[in-house]
Image (cartoon, rainbow, N blue to C red):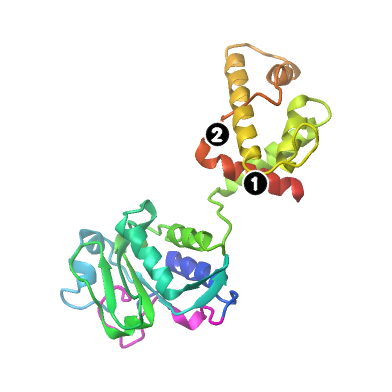
Amino acid sequence: MTRAPANLLALRTLLLTHLDNAPGPDDLDPAEVGIVGDPAHRGGYHCGSDRVVTNDYSVVESPRDRAGLTLDAAALDVGGFEVGSGGRTHTLASFSAWCVAQCAANAADTRDIREIIYSLDGSTVKRWDRLGKRSTGDSSHRWHTHFSFFRDAIKAGRDQRPLFRRYLSSIGLLEDDDMTPEEHNWLATVHKNLTVLDGRYPIGQIYTRMAEGRDETGAPVTGNWNLQAMTKQLTALQTTLNALAGKDFTDETAIIEGVLTGLTPEKIAAAIPPTIAKQVADELSRRLVA
């Protein structure tokens, strides 16, 4: 029988975690977020292979759907909500408009979405269709928004949460954190090692100041100082490491001393890409406070 796949269950959990019991007059209730159609439901993305019908549009219109047909449903319905965050009110309509805009822009994390059926005013039903075949839907979509996912993406178990994480981050209900568990573990090791160096070597002292948001005099700083300082200093560090790469060290202490020699508050390098530099700075600051 048609079943709810793990990747859509994970997406459902994400939305309920942050929109159920959220501040506002009308949060998102579990009964309003559905994956599998009721027993009478036949045809469409809410159905798996046991419930599709002859020439079902959710199967025949795309090779991605034909190749991905299993017992898994491939759709998610999201009901109405009205929550407050970041000084603004966010509703099903604004959520739907944001998601449609991301799909229309072909954002990378939308490409497994086949269609969105929605209403912005509770009256007119609209449809964004990646295949360009339809532009509206039935009246039930005046009070809920429907997402269809290409069946091959569901079959492959691909994570469908990134787009919705971005939405929750954009309205201030989720901290923007795209780092993997491995990256978090790496940062924990960096934090531990550099903290140990504080008081012994300049780089340890620089690290502590950056993580705490202080300048070399101990005064607090604002703005992007942490990010800018880290970028400059990590660049210098990368330069030092490159210079050492061709040397044959047999003494571990000599390696450490070589890396640390000459590092000052004016030098540290952008050894990490600018796109993740802020994440790194924020994570290091969070770990120091913790």
The quarter in which the N terminus is drawn is bottom left
Q: CA distance from mark 2 to mark 1?
A: 14 Å
User: Quick check: can you spot residue 155?
Assistant: no
- Identify the disc placed on residue 141: none
Quadrant of the rendered structure where residue 150 is?
Answer: bottom left
Which residue is at 39% across, 55% downward?
109
The structure residue drawn at horizontal position 40% and vertical position 64%, both measured from the top left corner, is: 98
Query: Is-magenta flag for residue 32?
Result: yes
- The answer to whether the residue labelled 2 contacts the one labelled 1, judged by CB atoms less than 8 Å apart, is no
Q: Residue at x 36, y 53 (%)?
A: 107
Q: Position of residue 280 (x, y in %)?
A: 61, 42
Q: Secondary structure at mark 1?
A: helix
Q: Is residue 236 above or below residue 223?
A: above
From this view, report whether residue 159 is shown above or below residue 1: above
Query: Image height check: is 246 above or below 140?
Result: above
Residue 22: horizontal and vertical position, in percent?
58, 74
Residue at 74% x, 18% y is 257
The residues colored magenta run 25-50
| Drawn side of residue 100 relative to residue 185, left or right | left
Q: Quadrant of residue 162?
A: bottom left
159 vs 67, nearest the viewer = 159
Disc number placed over residue 283 in the picture, else none: 1
Task: Give the residue type at disc 2.
Answer: Ile
Q: Tag 1 or tag 2, which sits nearer the N-term?
A: 2
Mark 2 highlights which residue? Answer: 272
Determine if the magenta segment contains residue 98. Answer: no
